[in-house]
Amino acid sequence: QVQLVESGGGLVQAGGSLRLSCTASNRAFSSYYMGWFRQAPGKERDFVAAISWSGARTYYADSVKGRLTISRDNAKNTVYLQMNNLKPEDTAVYYCAATTVYSGSADEGSFYYWGQGTQVTVSS
């Protein structure tokens, strides 16, 4: 069982930056692939990015490539999402997720464990 807690969300102006963090309770954190998803109001939850156990492999949705960066610190049981040049369309609840097996799919069904989410609001 893995408990995930996100933090770092907030209100930011367009063009600004935020860094989201997700800390896991499980000591086996380094054996999990980690991902970020987001859900805008009235829309389905969409894949944003994922990262392999070691951090050597990263995966991104086309819509965020070049602006959002996923990284992890296994010593701190934490995965990060650095978000730069934010746009109003990035407004959503951002969720952290974990899985032990991952093939690069954007399907949220690939992930077993989920955090409660953190709100990101980008004003124009």
Image (cartoon, rainbow, N blue to C red):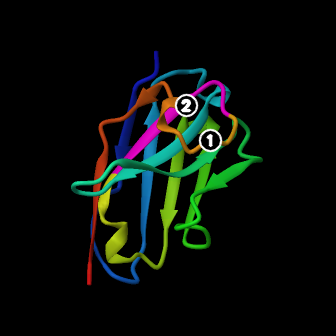
Name the side, left or right, on which 88 lies relative to 55.
left
Q: Which residues are magenta?
A: 94-102
Percent position of residue 80, x then y:
52, 51
Residue found at the very far top of the displayed protein: 1
Most frequent secondary structure within the magenta stretch: strand
Q: Is 29 drawn above or below residue 59 in the view shown?
A: above
Name the side, left or right, on which 12 lies relative to 58.
left
Three-letter code for the amino acid on which mark 1 is drawn: Ser
According to the picture, the residue beneath numbered tag 1 turns out to be 105
Q: Quadrant of the C terminus?
A: bottom left
Query: Which sits in the foreground, 98 or 47?
Result: 47
Asked if residue 64 lies in the magenta stretch, the reply is no
Marks 1/2: CA distance?
A: 7 Å
Of the numbered discs 1 and 2, the one sitting upstream in the chain is 1
Asked if residue 95 lies in the magenta stretch, the reply is yes
- The residue lying at 60 percent from left, 21 percent from top is 28
According to the picture, the residue beneath numbered tag 2 turns out to be 110
Percent position of residue 76, x then y:
55, 38
Three-letter code for the amino acid on which mark 2 is drawn: Ser
Which labelled disc corresponds to residue 58?
Answer: none
Percent position of residue 100, x then y:
63, 24
Query: Which element carries disc 2, helix, strand or loop?
Result: helix
- The residue lying at 59 percent from left, 65 percent from top is 62
- The residue lying at 56 percent from left, 21 percent from top is 27
